[in-house]
Amino acid sequence: MTTAVEMAQIWRGAIKESVHMGHAVICDAKGHVIEAWGDPDLVMLPRSSCKMVQALPLVESGVALDERQLALSCASHSGAAVHTEAVSRWLADLGLGEADLRCGPQEPEDIPARNGLIRAEEAPCQIHNNCSGKHAGFLTLNQKMGGDAEYVNPDHPLQLAIKDAFEDVTGETSPGYGIDGCSAPNFATSLSGLARAMAFFANAHRQSGVRAEAASRLTAAMMAHPLLVAGETRACTRLMRAMDGRAAIKTGAEAVFVAILPEQGLGVALKIADGTTRAAECAIASILVRLGVLEADHPATLERRNAPILNRRGIETGMIRPGEAFA
Amino acid sequence: MTTAVEMAQIWRGAIKESVHMGHAVICDAKGHVIEAWGDPDLVMLPRSSCKMVQALPLVESGVALDERQLALSCASHSGAAVHTEAVSRWLADLGLGEADLRCGPQEPEDIPARNGLIRAEEAPCQIHNNCSGKHAGFLTLNQKMGGDAEYVNPDHPLQLAIKDAFEDVTGETSPGYGIDGCSAPNFATSLSGLARAMAFFANAHRQSGVRAEAASRLTAAMMAHPLLVAGETRACTRLMRAMDGRAAIKTGAEAVFVAILPEQGLGVALKIADGTTRAAECAIASILVRLGVLEADHPATLERRNAPILNRRGIETGMIRPGEAFA
């Protein structure tokens, strides 16, 4: 196994206070690894970074979905009103409700939404869960399939269809799965398998077939609706806005990040070994700059990869910087 | 430089999802390193783990302080009512108020306190800052010293007195400082210097002199008031309760942890390279178990070092486990 390489540095004054090591892979249209840092064979869980893969069977089923719903099905949203209202309408259109979800409740990351619930003395519900768009998609497909209500069981036909799609686009037999924060199975892959899947999405617009068409529509939806995919303060939203249709990107828990670059036909996947989000955001920004789709001096880039660390009085105490791998 | 060693593992199902590398040192009564993992010479910032060192000049000054105030002066508290009421009284007794603090406002980690503020539509103030007890101590000493109001300036006599004490107990000339989250200077040391400082505290009760007496009183105060040092859900509080007077421990930002073991006369310091708190908590629990002051099967131990990771429906999805260094 190749050792992880340094992907982000945390400085405080003149002291290098913390470092983050990680792995990254870039794949081309043929699914070949054209550049790698650390261990491209690392077996990992994509977590929420593969939501666009999990949405393939939904889109391929031919159910009528608008572009906003496609974006929400790929989202790890912050539970803001824009997200929860859209998911609530979606469920209502299905004749379903919050109780049909199996993702569990989650306090919204969005501060106005969070504070609104607290002031109303209301508990967060499953619609606030960052995965509720993905689960609305699951329920939509499950309704069409006529499956039982426990759609997150790993042997449910819905999850078996997702596993098939996952293995197809990664080009690998998945070595296992973990249960995700939202209770759905999350299939393991090598890091290069995940990058290969993203390269499939990146090249889908040049290909024909049901799967390629679904992948192309999902990628376009993510790029067209950056706010629906995450939230106002989030890296996915801000960096996709900065790239303005040149790339779709997606984070996953435990510091996974992927990117789909349709112009270049490239797919990117990275994992920070210690699972820290700040480092995954810094590293994906470095790779996107390197690949020419993100401006190095765009404010959205600077806030993830050369950002001052401010303390509670707003004093600059340190900095997050790219690691040696991207120096 | 010696490479960091694996101190904690994050598992999800059968997949080892993330790993945390780090450094740790144990020093004896003479300040000698008796055991080390990774790099004992690592230059690091202790952050809040050295608050008991920062409180030495305060206690040595002879001002009248009760044991609860001594514990609060070493605290990174969660901003619960028990903390903020005590700090408010302390400031009032000095004839001072919230505006005299220089730590900045912070939303309380304590959920009832946080939600109470949100419901009242009140912004968090500086008394909610986890460092407000330390700053109340700073103000107390500054009043006695007659220093100017900007007591966090690195060249303020108060901070110079702290630097002297810090260099004395670490046995090193500090190579520099960073500005902490609370705006006070935080002096750098080697990791073995920080462990040596903790060994000084651990042996203080067997020694005479103003500094040893102050260190002994601060250690006793931390052990007697675990709740004041952190908060109901926090590792410092729960593990100190579990050890019931056999050790004082303290966390610091960016994954620092220290321990003072008066019975054995040992001091411990550790730093997780990536700055992740869950790993620092796991590692200090492993070392405390190894040193015989913490039961391996105590609930407080299990929740930090062999803890199931539950998802949003309460389903066990994974586990945090000690790393290879402590296997």
Image (cartoon, coloured by chain):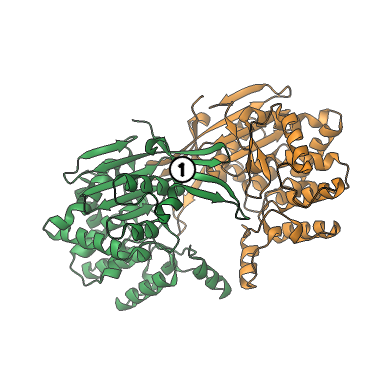
Chain colours: A green, B orange
Residue under the image location 60 percent in, 37 percent down: B284
Image coords of residue A105 (percent x, y): 46, 64
Q: Residue furthest front?
A: A297
Residue under the image location 35 percent in, 49 percent down: A257
Q: Chain of mark 1?
A: A
Q: Is residue A20 left or right of residue B54?
A: left
> Can residue A138 be spotted in the picture?
no
The answer to whether residue B321 is above or below residue B69 is above
Q: Residue furthest left?
A: A208
Q: Which residue is more in the foreground, B71 or A33? A: A33
Q: Which residue is mark 1?
A: A321
Q: Which residue is more in the foreground, B299 or B106? A: B106
Q: Quadrant of the N terminus of chain A?
A: top left
Image coords of residue B252 (percent x, y): 62, 43
The answer to whether residue A92 is above or below residue B36 is below
Image coords of residue B197 (percent x, y): 71, 31
Q: Quadrant of the C terminus of chain A?
A: top left
Q: Secondary structure at mark 1?
A: strand
Which three-letter amino acid code belongs to the residue tagged 1? Arg
Q: Which residue is more in the foreground, A16 or A78? A: A16
